[in-house]
Image (spheres, rainbow, N blue to C red):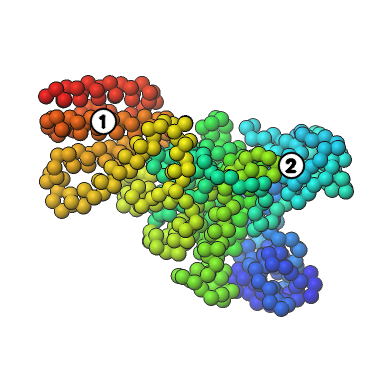
Amino acid sequence: MNAKGKIYRISGPVVIISGLNTRMYDVVKVGNEGLMGEVIGIEGDKSTVQVYEETSGVRPGEPAENTGMPLSVELGPGLLESIYDGIQRPLPVLKSTMGDFIKRGVFANGLSREKEWDFVPVVKKGDKVSGGSIIGTVRETQNIEHRILAPPNVSGTVEEIKKGKFKVDEVICTLSGGKNLMMMQKWPVRKPRPVGKKLMPKTPLITGQRILDGLFPVAKGGTAAIPGPFGSGKTVTQQQLAKWSDTEIVVYIGCGERGNEMADVLNEFPELEDPKTGRPLMERTVLIANTSNMPVAAREASVYTGITIAEYYRDMGYDVSLMADSTSRWAEAMREISSRLEEMPGEEGYPAYLAARLSEFYERAGKASTLCGREGSITVIGAVSPPGGDFSEPVTQNTLRIVKVFWALDAKLAQRRHFPAINWLNSYSLYSKALGDWYNENVSPEWIKLRNDAMELLQKEAELQEIVQLVGSDALPEDQQLTLEIARMVREYFLQQNAYHEVDTFCPMDKQYRLLKAITVWGNKAHSALESGSPIEEILKSKSKDDLAKVKFEKDFEGAISAISKSMDEEFRKLGGR
């Protein structure tokens, strides 16, 4: 056996090569065009390779060559503002060399070898450096400082360190034993990067979306799933999270989505303004685009590429949010490759190791004390696209066993134009209790009770709706009719949110608290007025109730909500006097 072999058999993206000396997950160049692939099985002198590119026209007998390296990503300055394919080839670079259609067998470096970065060292000669230590900084974008880290497996004493402008592949530091450090390092995508210690997530990820922050919060360093049928708003919800969540770095993986959806993302993201800084949002974003018509093997790799880049920024001490849209397409790629390998199928044809692969991916999320002594986190939010909206299918069910937040999108809500179309009866968050102290300190001691009361009200509404469908709402007692009306206010005034409205697209926590409190106060006053004999028709004509519907769109929210509170007191004083 040697470093060169020959193609023995081809089945779509799965190619069997004979006479090649390989290890599992080695990257192999296949055929005359040198298509990139990865070893996924070894039997005798035959290696099974999944190829990341289209294999049509490749024939048995063509040569294959082992690079001796696992699939790795290049980590260093220049990742932000980049748009990559699933194996970290920069798409703008490929477009500039070959136009709109990517040819096969083309290789491009993940990081530019031409651009120079201004390196400022933070260690000096004689300092001891261990794996993960910060040796210097680079201003990557206007608001993000890129901390240059020593690779996790390197340590020693600084013998020489330079300051000035350097390319990513130039030596900037020499350690004892002749170890040279550059601004760039490579890391195998399937191997999680080490951390000092995993920490409990106790801070919520503030998204500005009321149904998420208010009812089903996710913690920084947590995991969430957004399952939903076609057209229910998964991609818009994930884009809202990418735009507004209070993390410093965003990694967005378009994994197997339709080309036109991905094109919208690629066109829209570069034009978005970061609400925190007023600068372009792309300055803190990495996009990985892998559409449904790209080869399946690259789709499978894209998720690992994205999470490795996220781990690199976490290691610097940043909070990172990673959007995977969608893990169903990733699982379908695994299913296709598994069937070509003639493995024993599990449920619905998915491989038996589906649950293990999903667990491996989501377990790389978390809050951690990094090797450089800072705290960083990765929050993973994965969209799931169950066929026909069937949540009992294997990808959704296996994801639910792993993640702690479940935002269930509902096609019926989307048809009624209720967005975000998250079903409040099917969704849940297991972080609510852990985040309680944070809400008490930073929002209000009343917040948790307000949220629980709202959930209880929505639950009651669901029970009453079953009776309403049989006998009509007029047959209900007046207090239950009022309960239905208050629940409608919670749904339409609080949970409904317009992603395209300049004010309503983002709702800070204090505004969410004031709005939910105002609706709850109106409800309590309405019940009191009803008990004191006021007719329900008069209560429902309340002007303050109509004003509450519009207040979330007001630029001067504070002034508007205070005015509504005063008019509410006045109205119910008159009603109560009858």
**Quadrant including the C terminus:** top left
User: Does the rendering let one see residue 533?
Assistant: yes
Q: Name which of mark 1 and mark 2 comes first in the sequence.
A: 2
Q: Is residue 22 left or right of residue 211?
A: right
Q: Is residue 124 left or right of residue 471?
A: right
Q: Is residue 347 above or below residue 502?
A: below
Instruction: Kindly identify which numbered label has been placed on residue 522.
Output: 1
Circle 1 Cα neighbour tier, 10 Å, few/some/many (<14 / 14–19 / ≥20):
many
Circle 2 Cα neighbour tier, 10 Å, few/some/many (<14 / 14–19 / ≥20):
many
Name the residue carrying label 2: 133
Q: Residue 183: horizontal and vertical position, in percent?
A: 76, 43
Type of the residue with mark 1: Trp
Counting every numbered tag in the picture gives 2
> In front: 201, or 256?
201
Q: Is residue 106 left or right of residue 425?
A: right
Pointer 1 and pointer 2: residues touching (CB < 8 Å)? Answer: no
Identify the secondary structure beneath mark 2: loop
Q: Real-space Cα distance between discs 1 and 2?
A: 55 Å
Instruction: Kindly identify which numbered label has been placed on residue 163.
Output: none
Q: Is residue 415 left or right of residue 52?
A: left
> In front: 361, or 386?
361
Type of the residue with mark 2: Ser
User: Does the rendering let one see residue 251?
Assistant: no
Q: Is residue 302 above or below residue 488?
A: below
Q: Residue 477: horizontal and vertical position, in percent?
A: 13, 42
